[in-house]
Image (tube, rainbow, N blue to C red):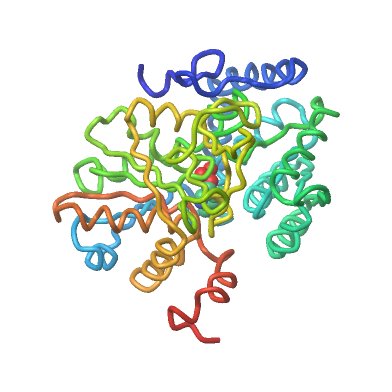
Amino acid sequence: MSAEQLPDKKGFFGPYGGQYIPDQLKDIMNDISHEYDMLREDPDFIEELQSLYRDYVGRPSPIFEAKRLTENSGGAKIYLKREDLNHSGAHKINHTLGEVLLAKHMGKKKVIAETGAGQHGVALATAAALLGLECDIYMGEVDIAKEHPNVVRMKILGAQVIPVSHGLKTLKEAVDAAFEAYVKDPITQLYAIGSVVGPHPFPMMVRDFQAIVGKESREQFLEKTGALPGHVVACVGGGSNAMGIFTGFLDDKSVNLYGVEPAGLSFKEGEHAATISKGTPGILHGFFSYLLKDEKGEPAPVYSVASGLDYPGVGPQHSYLKDIGRVNYETAGDKEAIDAFFKISRLEGIIPALESAHAVAYAMKLAASLSKDETILINLSGRGDKDIDFVVEKYGEQYGVVL
Ligand SMILES: *Cc1c(COP(=O)(O)O)cnc(C)c1O
């Protein structure tokens, strides 16, 4: 079955995905699904989204040959797909624009979501401002204190940031609170999920909105080098930037694909978020996929130095691609990611997001194991402005940054 034919009508990628939600929500998800099925074929919707990608986001993002990083790694040539150059600084704007445009076409007044580090919140608030919808972002009080610049950005953009003060006051509680608010009024609001996760149709829709990255990459790489890349590498949190770039190459059997999960500090419970590498299948947030569980079978606590990667689940299509052996799932730890963060900053003048630094870390190792005539394309999912204060405070001295 070719890549675009998945998922099936019920939202399954093999055994993964689906809709494990109350019946009341099934009706709502099916409405969204129905509307999306029409819009994805509608030339006006397609043109509206494409023109926003072009004139607002600044697409296509370039592919850049990282010559000094290549030389330093020793081996395959490394290229970067520059999603860090998108308006608002990461790949997330590709799917939030799609989601908010969908909401607008459905006559919704408001988009709502949770956010952890605030990246999804900012990307959604950006798209909502542009398209004139209200935006409510649920955020744990602990995260609000930690992620001050993103809270300020969301408020400047006109979003309401709603503090969540129960439990651990972080992402999981924020998901619960956003979900509760959504169930109360699913008619005037759309819950805009932040990655290729959640019940059908979100894993499919978010993938489709991100697929522009893979489509551009394939064309650009062919044009630039006369061939397809031998290897494509992307970091995996929920898995949206990886699914975006992989979708362009799934049917090209010569292209090796690598998803890089965060190994954090160690593979002890609570010290990593390598869901596919270390998890087992289960249900979380309305879908069936690989999942990190504690001994009771509940979602395990997770950690990564990159807060955009610390999710105990993963998009269902990744689970399927793992099982059929189409994508290799690898890991990079905090230390390797920080090292890669400084390397690419100092060798290329590009400060990457800590999430993207995980892909860079693995790609450098991979490059060293390959010959000079091979090529690697990294999806550089975002820029690192959001991370600089944290990195310098915690690791600056080790890397000679003295303030
Ligand atoms: C949120 C984020 C990620 C992780 O999300 P995916 O859905 O796995 O792509 C990766 N990179 C950046 C820059 C992010 O903001």
- Residue at the extreme front: 295
How far from the left and from the top, in percent, is residue 94? 54, 42
On the picture, is 117 further left or further right than 388? right
- Residue at the extreme right: 184
| Residue 56 visible in the snapshot | no
The picture quadrant where one finds residue 319 is top left
> Which residue shows up at 43% across the image and 59% down it?
357
Q: Nearer the viewer, residue 56 or 314?
A: 314
- Residue at the extreme top: 9
How far from the left and from the top, in percent, is residue 134? 79, 42
In which quadrant will I find the N terminus? top left
How far from the left and from the top, in percent, is residue 233? 35, 47
On the picture, is 263 further left or further right than 230? right
Q: Is residue 372 above or below residue 21?
A: below
Q: Is residue 24 above or below residue 138?
A: above
Q: How many marks?
A: 0
In which quadrant will I find the C terminus? bottom right
> Which residue shows up at 78% across the image and 50% down it?
159
Q: Nearer the viewer, residue 150 or 308?
A: 308
Q: Nearer the viewer, residue 26 or 381?
A: 26
| Residue 160 visible in the snapshot | yes
> Which residue shows up at 26% across the image and 37% down it?
255
